[in-house]
Amino acid sequence: MVSSKSKGAWLPVSMGLQRGGKMPFRMRTFTIALLTILVTFSQGDLMAGSLRPSHYERGHTVFVKSLKVNINGGLIRITNTGTALDGATIEIPIGALEKEVTLSIGYDTGIVNLNSGKGSGSVIVLTTTPDIVFKKPVKIKVRFDRNVNAKTIVGYEIDKQGRLHSIDIGSINNDSGVVSFYTFKPLIFTWIYI
């Protein structure tokens, strides 16, 4: 990274933000927060003074797979469902669960309304019965559209009011077209190309 010094502070001239690129954790956290703001509020909305956030209008949830998972964790692969979930995996590490739960994965038919960026067209639903919090992060891998011209991909949890909240991204593999996200809880989520 090239920098210039101004009044005792180092200012980045080029961040080199590209899919698959490495950047320091603090810069990555700042970048994700900034991209979240940009997706949540479009430039036109900010200039007009009306803050209309991006939001989700819930549809109908369809579950494609359910199974029991215990304290030993496991790897769940979604295949042959004929849905956008095909190719998705959920990695539950050993110790993420304190007891056996039924984990269900599906999709929701609702609409993601964005002020900027391009939606993935997929909304994934991950639930557990009983409802729990994972003790270790669970990794969710999904396929993304490699033909979309974007600088990065940002994952968003969708809360009960339809608001979008950024989630942790693990990696983006452009060769395989797979992006991974981490969560400590069951959630409804999507991803956006920015």
Image (spheres, grey):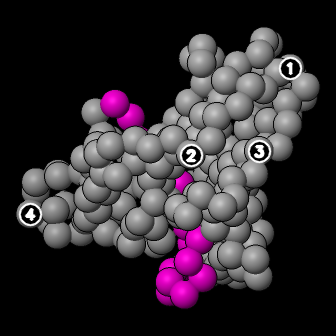
Q: Is 166 or 112 nearer to us in this picture?
A: 112
Q: Nearer the viewer, mark 3 or mark 4?
A: 3
The label on residue 13 is none
Residue at 10% over, 54% down: 50
Q: Earlier in the sequence, mark 2 or mark 1?
A: 2
The label on residue 64 is 2
Query: Above or below — where is 93 with respect to 51?
Result: above
Q: Nearer the viewer, mark 4 or mark 2?
A: 2
Q: Whole-percent x and y of residue 99?
A: 78, 12
Secondary structure of the residue carrying numbered label 3: strand
Which residue is denoted by mark 1 in the rendering? 71
Kind of residue at disc 4: Ala
Q: Is residue 53 left or right of residue 60?
A: left
The label on residue 48 is 4
- Cα distance in 3D space between marks 2 and 1: 23 Å
Q: Earlier in the sequence, mark 4 or mark 2?
A: 4
Kind of residue at disc 1: Ile
Q: Determine if the magenta segment contains residue 161.
A: no
- Cα distance in 3D space between marks 4 and 1: 52 Å
Q: Earlier in the sequence, mark 4 or mark 1?
A: 4
- Cα distance in 3D space between marks 3 and 2: 12 Å
Query: Above or below — where is 165 with respect to 38?
Result: above
Q: Earlier in the sequence, mark 3 or mark 1?
A: 1
